C-alpha cells in the first residue's frame, strides 16, 4: 500500500479514485469517516488519504493525479456572463466590468 494523495476535499479524493479505478488501479480512501468530525481536530491530522493497494502503481497513480489536476485547472477557466470576457480560474470577478463570477 502506498499513499498517493491527501486532501481535505473528500469529493475530490473520490473523483481521483474513480479516475485511478478506470485505469484498473486498485485504491482505497482512508480516514473517510473521520472527515465529518475534522472541525474538532487540528487541521491536517485526519485529512482523507488516497492509497493505491499495489505499491507498483504509485508512480503511475501520481502521474494520473497530476494530469487530472492540470486538466481541472483548464476547465476552471470562466467567461463573464455580463460582458463575455474570458478569465482564468484565479480571478473571482471580471476585471472588465466587475461582474462577480457565477458559480
Ligand atoms: Zn465582465
Image (cartoon, rainbow, N blue to C red):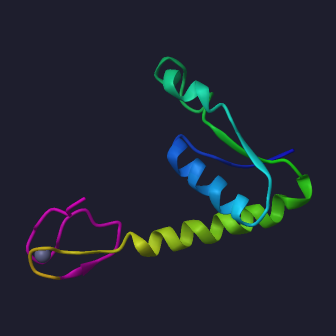
**In the image, is residue 97 part of the stretch drawn in magenta?**
yes
In the rendering, at what x and y percent does residue 88 appear?
Answer: 34, 74
The part of the chain drawn in magenta is 85-103
Relative to 84, residue 46 above or below: above
In the rendering, at what x and y percent does residue 85 appear?
Answer: 19, 82
Provide the major secondary structure of the magenta segment: loop
In the picture, measured across the screen, residue 6 lies left or right of residue 62, that is left
Image quarter where the N terminus lies is top right
Q: Residue at x 56, y 66 (%)?
A: 69
Q: Residue at x 25, y 81 (%)?
A: 86
Q: Nearer the viewer, residue 40 or 34?
A: 34
Q: How many marks?
A: 0
In the picture, measured across the screen, residue 95 lies left or right of residue 77, that is left
> To which quarter of the image does residue 95 belong?
bottom left
In the picture, measured across the screen, residue 90 lies left or right of residue 24, that is left
In the picture, measured across the screen, residue 6 lies left or right of residue 58, that is left
**In the image, is residue 9 part of the stretch drawn in magenta?**
no
> To which quarter of the image does residue 103 belong?
bottom left
Amino acid at each position: 500500500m502506498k499513499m498517493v494523495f491527501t486532501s481535505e476535499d473528500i469529493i475530490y479524493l473520490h473523483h481521483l479514485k474513480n479516475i485511478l479505478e478506470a485505469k484498473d488501479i486498485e485504491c482505497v480512501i482512508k480516514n473517510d469517516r473521520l472527515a465529518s468530525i475534522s472541525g474538532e481536530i487540528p487541521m491536517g491530522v485526519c485529512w482523507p488519504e488516497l492509497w493505491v493497494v499495489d505499491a507498483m502503481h504509485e508512480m503511475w497513480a501520481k502521474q494520473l493525479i497530476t494530469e487530472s489536476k492540470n486538466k481541472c485547472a483548464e476547465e476552471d477557466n470562466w467567461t463573464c456572463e455580463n460582458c463575455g470576457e474570458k478569465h482564468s480560474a484565479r480571478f473571482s470577478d471580471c476585471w472588465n466590468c466587475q461582474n462577480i463570477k457565477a458559480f
